[in-house]
Amino acid sequence: MKNIAFLSFALLLAPAVASAQTAATVPDHGPSAGMIRMHEQMMQARQQVRAQMLGALTPAHRTLLASVVGGLAVSPSPNVEAAAKQLDAALSPQESRAILDVEASFHAQMRAAMQSLENSGDVPKHEAPPGEMHVKRAPDAGFALLHAALGFGGLMRPPHAP
């Protein structure tokens, strides 16, 4: 009986022991130190961008932004384009300029960080596949503000948007 219990216990542990042995021989393909630093820089820069953009708004426009974001959150079919246009139309020229300046600075900072990371050899150089075109869009403060307010996550414009 003791032999059966011991054999059962040994068989139960066999996969864990085998996994531990192979884990020690498999090289680590986790993110490099450079990638981790860049991720931390991006997160910090995003927080700064968001704070600067919100700081550029009047209290009334911060309230409008909250309303627009809330409307997108509860809508069964949110229309990001319409929301961005609504914000863009409400912003003063000074607010729009401040938001676009912050966005341009953020993009330049991220391009420089990525270039530095590529030059360090921590990541392969990024090249667009042949034939891939990046559509240049006119700067849009409403969309930039919406993107920052929503945490920069997954907010995409339809391909046909101007």
Image (tube, rainbow, N blue to C red):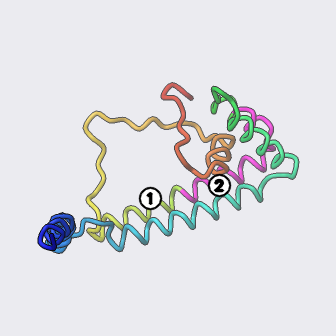
Q: Residue at x 75, y 33 (%)?
A: 86
Q: Residue at x 37, y 67 (%)?
A: 35
User: For mark 1, what is the residue?
Assistant: 111
- Taking depth in this image into account, of 149 and 139 the one nearest to the observer is 149
Determine whether the residue tagged by mark 1 lies in a helix, strand or loop. Answer: helix
In the figure, residue 115 lies in which quadrant?
bottom left
Identified by mark 1, the residue type is Arg
Residue 43, visible in the rendered structure: yes
The quadrant of the image that shows the N terminus is bottom left
Identified by mark 2, the residue type is Asp
Residue 100 in magenta? Answer: yes
* In the rendered image, the vertical position of residue 146 relative to residue 126, given as above or below: above
Give coordinates of residue 60: x percent, y percent: 88, 47
* In the rendered image, the vertical position of residue 69 relative to residue 25, given as above or below: above
Residue range corresponding to the magenta coloring? 85-106
Give coordinates of residue 147: x percent, y percent: 61, 46
Q: Is residue 65 left or right of residue 3?
A: right
Q: Earlier in the sequence, mark 2 or mark 1?
A: 2
Give coordinates of residue 122: x percent, y percent: 29, 68
Q: Residue at x 28, y 57 (%)?
A: 125
In the figure, residue 129 lies in which quadrant?
top left
User: For mark 2, what is the residue?
Assistant: 101
* In the rendered image, the vertical position of residue 145 relative to residue 43, given as above or below: above
The quadrant of the image that shows the C terminus is top right
